[in-house]
Image (cartoon, rainbow, N blue to C red):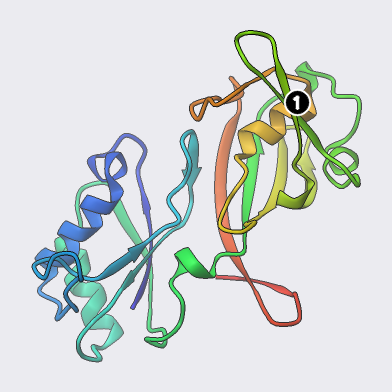
Amino acid sequence: MRIVFTCAEKSPARLNTFNAVRSMVLASGLPYEPAKVNKNWPRLAYGPAPSMGVRAEREYLDIYLLSAEPIQKVREALEQAKPQGLTLLDVQRVPYALPSVQNLAAAAVYRVEGNFDLFAPDMTAEDFFNAARVDITRRADNGLALVQNAKPYIWKAQTVSNRAVRLTLLNVQGKWERPQTLIAAWLGIDIPAQDEAFTVEGFTFIRESFLWQDSEGEFHPI
């Protein structure tokens, strides 16, 4: 079963989402398949988890059950067992052999909200991110700079309004680029080297959805 949910900001479920959903499945009474690492835990596939500083409108959990259960029964069991702050958005039956969202996600759609006019970027988001090369410069404390071409991680960009930009970023060999870093590069903000907590102050980063890619290269919402 594929579960789509969201967690309220600063809720107990948001602070440690995997533990929260595992406890939910344990308390639900559903006939789960045991995990290989611990037979007392359910076999689950959660994620990809949102990176630090990103709010997810939709999160995903694949639950492996020992028997085919009606969707309504699964939803009711999870509703009764869910932790405070977690909202179930959807429950879907998917083929057992279908890859989990963790392995299926080929792209992620982000919405970035804030006052971009304060930085007066030289180019529009479309012109900057859709260029043939998108350079990111990370600076270490000693002043040394590392320049990386982030273009392989970027599929497209769209200006939604003067206060919102949408980025669609690609999974490249299992790696993702953080939207905070890309927005900083566009706005000309210094990016520290090896700082996973780096963000652009005053902006909100929201992961809207994931996309999977078919054999012809077309993207589809998960």
Q: Can I make out residue 29 in this image?
A: yes
Q: Is residue 114 left or right of residue 47?
A: right
- Residue shown at 59% from the left, 49% from the top: 176
Amino acid type, callout 1:
Phe
Front position in the image: 79 or 52: 52
Q: Name the quarter where the C terminus is drawn.
A: bottom right
Task: Provide the residue designation for mark 1.
Answer: 116
- Residue shown at 82% from the left, 39% from the top: 134
Q: Secondary structure at mark 1?
A: helix
- Residue shown at 90% from the left, 44% from the top: 131
Where does the image place residue 110, in percent across and percent down from the top left? Answer: 62, 47
Q: Is residue 151 left or right of residue 41?
A: right
Where does the image place residue 194, in percent across and percent down from the top left? Answer: 55, 26
Front position in the image: 179 or 138: 138
Q: Is residue 24 above or below residue 188?
A: below
Q: Is residue 181 above or below residue 73?
A: above
Residue at the bottom extreme? 68
